[in-house]
Image (spheres, grey):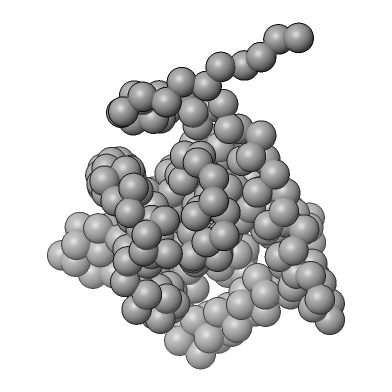
Amino acid sequence: MQTEEIVIRPGLSEKNYWKDLWRYRELFYILSWRDIKVRYKQTVVGAAWSIIRPVITAVIFTILFSKVAKLDNPGVAPYALMVFAGLLPWQFFANALSESSNSLVGNSNLITKVYFPRMIVPASSVITSLVDFAISFGIFLVMLVWFQFLPPIQVLALPLFILLAFLCAVGIGLYLTALNVKYRDFKYIIPFIVQFGLYITPIGFSSSVIPEKWRIIYAFNPMVGIIDGFRWCLLGDPFNPVSLGISIAITVMALLIGIRYFRKVEKTFADNI
């Protein structure tokens, strides 16, 4: 009969942390699948909320900015398509940020009982948000057929912008979830951040309506370049490479800062949670 020897040494978990992320990949799958199954459990319409929410939001934004504010789409696509193309990455980012920022507190029993790389928990929450994104993207495909609009060839670059939105959500989410463990006030601050971001992000309008002198400053919202990139890929709308460059730089910075801070305070999670 073979026995497995477990060796516990000081600093060993630090040395093998990134290897442990791969070793515990099954836990990553389990947490992701669990979150998907319970997301709309015991709701009246269930998973239909993932369709109802983006559709209602898109209708409101289209009426508000196109009919009331009389804004135009600088591209050739119908205004409703422009709104939904901007809503796709924002909805994913907002959902991922909200879910990941509360993920550690929501899994406190697991955090305090067993060892595993804690980064798995917020990362699995971000993956879960990809399911809603996929459903919303399916709605967008139906809209393309309805409006008889054919995406341009640059649609092939769309996975790169999805990856950029994913990394941005992971970086900011890691930082916020670490703060939320220590300072529970962030439970109330994060929804405000998401709500505020909805109004300063070009979802219901094109970023081209921003005056030229303010566009560089406006682009420091990393979702500006990402949303512009989505519209460029899906609709062929005008694209500002400067905004993309700023979004990439901020995303990389947020990811590095988020990982560094998360790893720095990770040892205290079990005590503070």
Judging depth in this view, the residue of 202 and 99 nearest the camera is: 99
Judging depth in this view, the residue of 89 and 259 nearest the camera is: 259
Quarter of the picture containing the N terminus is top right
Judging depth in this view, the residue of 135 and 58 nearest the camera is: 135
Query: Residue 249, relative to residue 37: is it above or below?
Result: above
- Horizontal and vertical percent for residue 192? 39, 80
- Horizontal and vertical percent for residue 88? 58, 59
Which residue corresponds to the image point at 54% horizontal and 27% vertical from the top-left? 22
Which residue corresponds to the image point at 75% horizontal and 69% vertical from the top-left? 40
- Horizontal and vertical percent for residue 91? 55, 64
- Horizontal and vertical percent for residue 182? 32, 66
Q: Is residue 244 left or right of residue 187?
A: left
Query: Residue 127, relative to residue 187: is it above or below?
Result: above
Which residue corresponds to the image point at 33% horizontal and 54% vertical from the top-left? 268
Judging depth in this view, the residue of 240 and 93 nearest the camera is: 93
Taking the view exactly as shown, the residue that stands out farthest to the left is 213
